[in-house]
């Protein structure tokens, strides 16, 4: 098949979850005889506000179109964030020229709805993988600007508009004053509410135009069950290259218990909760260490705040960015992996990779994180966002050697889905999409 993979970003400049997923997918498809091309957004902060620039290159043998435009100066920035006509025009020309058998979109951020409509108009079947909640929430995470979480999108789109407003500077600074926030919440913002209602309408139309919608977690699938027909909504768990990971035979038998965090070091990942919880632990017979691996995700101030929170504690080590080929050795050196995110993680690779390396996992009790960890068998849950409860759970690991042993044995017994298993299901999804897609209407 001739397959195009649109995604918001792509390596080498970007290397978060969806980017690495797309890279791995492209390499596997190439290795199995398919013709693959990636289309990614490279830059949204430079150039002309009404022009799109496209450059073509290769990344480790993968052909990549890199698109740039100035979203910050767009004439209708709030609209273009989810329905960018520049992208719609470019993709329509691209689909007409390349005539791919299928387009597999990754999430929706920056790409938006317009390219999906372009695919529909040109008769290109579409598969969409949901990596986050962008189709439901302009914040991507269902996390409100006040730090709380939405169980589902609010009925009134004006609530989303206000939440989005308070996520921007300088409104964040104003929002620290409760009286200001209370007063602003009472103000009518009809234009913002109408735009948010339009966002919902356009994104629902985009979902309706997709032949197959892929959810990486049961939690994600449940949130979209009312928005996507059951025959088009498919649960497909991410697979792992298990041969990369060879966990140690024994963990925790040495003089030190090493807790670790591996991933993007950003506020929504909850690393501050982990640092706070760790510092309240009481050491027993064994010493303890906390190793934090990952880059700052464009927010160096957050890492600085973590380092200040850790103070002079030599047991807390910040390792910074690392090459992905070092991941097996990093996980091999950890006794427990902690995933403390304060949003509904979908299907965190950090958990799957930890289990592939036979490391038990401590994670929050919500979203796709919780469904991956069998509490008390191969890991433990704690109350999301609660540093004190995380400390309680970590202390149990230190205080109860039998629990520690049971969790380590459980992690060694975990069966992790392989990439081959995932990809065979995905190819079946592609074939279904080509059949369904050709029956779909080709006009909006």
Image: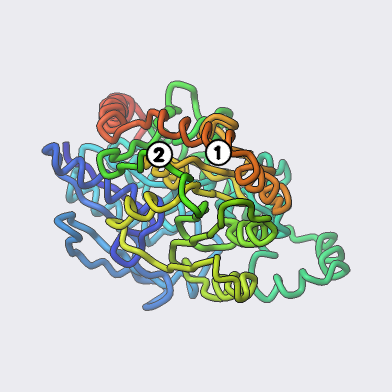
Work out whether 157 lies above or below 85: above
In the rendered image, the residue lying farthest to the front is 285
> Which dot marks residue 358?
2
Residue at horizontal 44%, vertical 28%? 235
Number of callouts: 2
Residue 212 percent coordinates (x, y): 38, 31
Specify the quadrant that holds the N terminus: top left
Residue at horizontal 28%, vertical 47%? 5
Residue at horizontal 58%, vertical 54%? 138
**Quarter location, residue 244:** top left
Work out whether 287 lies above or below 96: below
The mark lying in front, picked from 1 and 2, is 1
In the rendered image, the residue lying farthest to the left is 33
Q: Is residue 80 left or right of residue 187?
A: left
Can the viewer see residue 244 in this picture? yes
424 or 433, nearer to the observer: 424
378 or 216, nearer to the observer: 378
Q: Is residue 33 left or right of residue 389?
A: left
Q: Which residue is mark 1?
A: 404
Residue 289 percent coordinates (x, y): 53, 59
SS category of the residue bearing label 1: helix
Residue 222 percent coordinates (x, y): 57, 30
Residue 226 percent coordinates (x, y): 58, 29
Sequence-wise first label, 1 or 2: 2
Work out how far the residue at label 1 is from the one at label 2, CA to CA, in angstroms: 13 Å
Residue at horizontal 22%, vertical 58%? 64
Q: Are marks 1 and 2 in contact (CB under 8 Å)?
A: no
276 or 352, nearer to the observer: 276
49 or 346, nearer to the observer: 346
Q: Is residue 373 left or right of residue 437?
A: right
Specify the quadrant that holds the C terminus: top left
């Amino acid at each position: 098949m001739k397959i195009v993979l649109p995604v918001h970003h792509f390596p080498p400049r970007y290397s978060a979850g969806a980017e690495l997923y797309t890279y791995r997918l492209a390499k596997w498809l190439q290795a199995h005889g398919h013709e693959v091309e990636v289309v990614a957004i490279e830059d949204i902060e430079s150039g002309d506000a009404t022009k799109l620039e496209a450059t073509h290159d290769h990344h480790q043998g993968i052909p990549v179109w890199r698109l740039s435009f100035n979203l910050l100066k767009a004439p209708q920035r709030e609209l273009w964030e989810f329905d960018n006509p520049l992208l719609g025009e470019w993709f329509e020309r691209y689909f007409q020229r390349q005539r791919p058998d299928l387009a597999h979109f990754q999430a929706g951020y920056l790409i938006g709805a317009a390219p999906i409509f372009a695919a529909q108009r040109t008769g290109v079947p579409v598969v969409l993988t949901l990596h986050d909640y962008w189709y439901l929430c302009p914040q991507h995470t269902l996390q409100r600007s006040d730090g709380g979480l939405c169980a589902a999108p609010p009925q009134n789109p004006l609530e989303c508009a206000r939440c989005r407003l308070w996520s921007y500077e300088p409104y964040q600074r104003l929002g620290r004053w409760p009286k200001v926030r209370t007063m602003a919440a009472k103000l009518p913002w009809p234009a913002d509410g109408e735009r948010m209602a339009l966002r919902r309408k356009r994104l629902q139309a985009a979902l309706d135009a997709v032949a197959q919608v892929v959810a990486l977690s049961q939690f994600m699938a449940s949130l979209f069950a009312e928005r996507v027909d059951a025959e088009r909504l498919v649960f497909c768990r991410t697979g792992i290259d298990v041969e990369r990971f060879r966990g140690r035979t024994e963990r925790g038998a040495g003089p030190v218990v090493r807790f670790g965090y591996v991933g993007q070091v950003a506020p929504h990942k909850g690393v501050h909760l982990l640092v706070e919880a760790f510092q309240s632990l009481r050491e027993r017979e064994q010493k303890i260490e906390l190793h934090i691996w990952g880059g700052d995700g464009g927010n160096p101030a957050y890492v600085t705040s973590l380092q200040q929170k850790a103070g002079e504690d030599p047991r807390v080590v910040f390792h910074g960015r690392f090459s992905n080929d070092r991941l097996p050795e990093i996980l091999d050196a950890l006794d427990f992996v902690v995933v403390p995110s304060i949003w509904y993680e979908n299907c965190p690779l950090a958990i799957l990779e930890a289990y592939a390396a036979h490391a038990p996992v401590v994670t929050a009790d919500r979203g796709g994180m919780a469904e991956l960890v069998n509490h008390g068998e191969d890991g433990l849950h704690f109350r999301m966002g609660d540093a004190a409860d995380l400390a309680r759970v970590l202390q149990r690991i230190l205080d109860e050697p039998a629990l520690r042993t049971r969790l380590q044995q459980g992690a060694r017994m975990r069966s992790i889905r392989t990439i081959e298993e995932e990809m065979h299901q995905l190819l079946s999804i592609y074939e279904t999409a080509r059949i369904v897609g050709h029956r779909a209407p080709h006009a909006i």
